Image: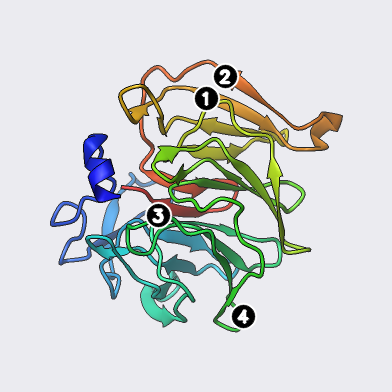
Amino acid sequence: MSVRWAVRGRTRVRWGCTLLSALMLAVVRSPASTQAASWSPAPSLSTARAAHTATLLANGKVLVAGGGTGPFAATASAELYDPASSTWSPAASMTTARYLHAATTLRDGRVLVIGGSGDGSGWDASTESYDPASDTWTSTASRLGLPSAAHATTSLADGRVLVTGGVSDADPDATVELYDAVSGAWSSAERMTNGRDGHTATLLAGGDVLVTGGFTGGPTGWVLTASAELFTPPGCRDRTERWRGRPHHTAGRRTGVVADTANPSQGDAP
């Protein structure tokens, strides 16, 4: 897999001082106020990691889960940041080590972690959920229909989770799946117009989901895309499920974040 990445001229994981700092420095941006915006140091993570996820919990804490710790090496460890005391504390480890995964908050307060890669040799279709009340992880019985990494997740207005794109096998994929937290089942949805990974997917006020940018496939390999498209979930404003193209960005870009923007949950995608 690493050879194929090199042939395509794309380094998905850049290890070393540019990505994993021995200082593991974190910073906090001061909230909006009458004073000028500023940054200040925050306590460091206990484990240096990249391509992990960070999810805001209902209790105000931030769950950091998984990530890469070296070339094609993933961790299952997790940590909790408490803004009230400005401290990090260990959380229970995931059942599966992974990076380039996605995480999103469910309506009941649990965090759903989806896909990713464990050792760089392939992609993972497994999913698991974290219960903040008991500090436990539970593997879900159902799995993604297609193993994937660097995908985007979005919590829809009806409580379901939309998973779009990602890299599967060796190419950006257009696959779309829906997770029903009540039944715990996955179902397929209409494919995107373009396969893409490293993109963003944002829930809009009207219920549509806006997907922007990322990498897409091309005759010479993976290329940055400026394209965007809208997804209308089933039942949204009494319309049928469908994707609609939108005007391009002014410049192609890779987001660097796999995010659930409906909930404050992000995962870095180097």
Residue occupying image coordinates x 40% and y 25%:
225
Q: Position of residue 57 (x, y in %)?
A: 56, 66
Q: Earlier in the sequence, mark 2 or mark 1?
A: 1
* Callout 2 amino acid: Arg
Residue indicated by mark 2: 246
Q: Earlier in the sequence, mark 3 or mark 1?
A: 3
Mark 3 vs mark 4: give the one in front: 3
* Callout 4 amino acid: Ala
- Label 2 packing within 10 angstroms: few (<14), some (14-19), many (20+): few
Q: Position of residue 113 (x, y in %)?
A: 53, 62
- Label 3 and label 4: CA atoms lie apart by 26 Å
Residue occupying image coordinates x 35% and y 27%:
224
Q: Position of residue 125 (x, y in %)?
A: 53, 59
- Label 3 packing within 10 angstroms: few (<14), some (14-19), many (20+): many
Q: Earlier in the sequence, mark 3 or mark 2?
A: 3
- The reply to whether callout 2 and callout 1 are in contact (CB within 8 Å) is yes
- Label 3 and label 2: CA atoms lie apart by 27 Å
- Label 2 and label 1: CA atoms lie apart by 5 Å
| Image position of 181 with respect to 155: above or below | below
Q: Say left or right for 222 vs 244.
A: left
Q: Earlier in the sequence, mark 2 or mark 4?
A: 4
Q: Earlier in the sequence, mark 3 or mark 4?
A: 3
Residue occupying image coordinates x 48% and y 22%:
227
Residue occupying image coordinates x 35% and y 56%:
51
Residue indicated by mark 3: 100
Mark 3 vs mark 1: give the one in front: 3
Viewer-proximal residue, 142 or 104? 142
Q: Say left or right for 171 vs 192.
A: left
Viewer-proximal residue, 126 or 206? 126
Secondary structure under tag 4 reads: loop
- Label 3 and label 1: CA atoms lie apart by 22 Å
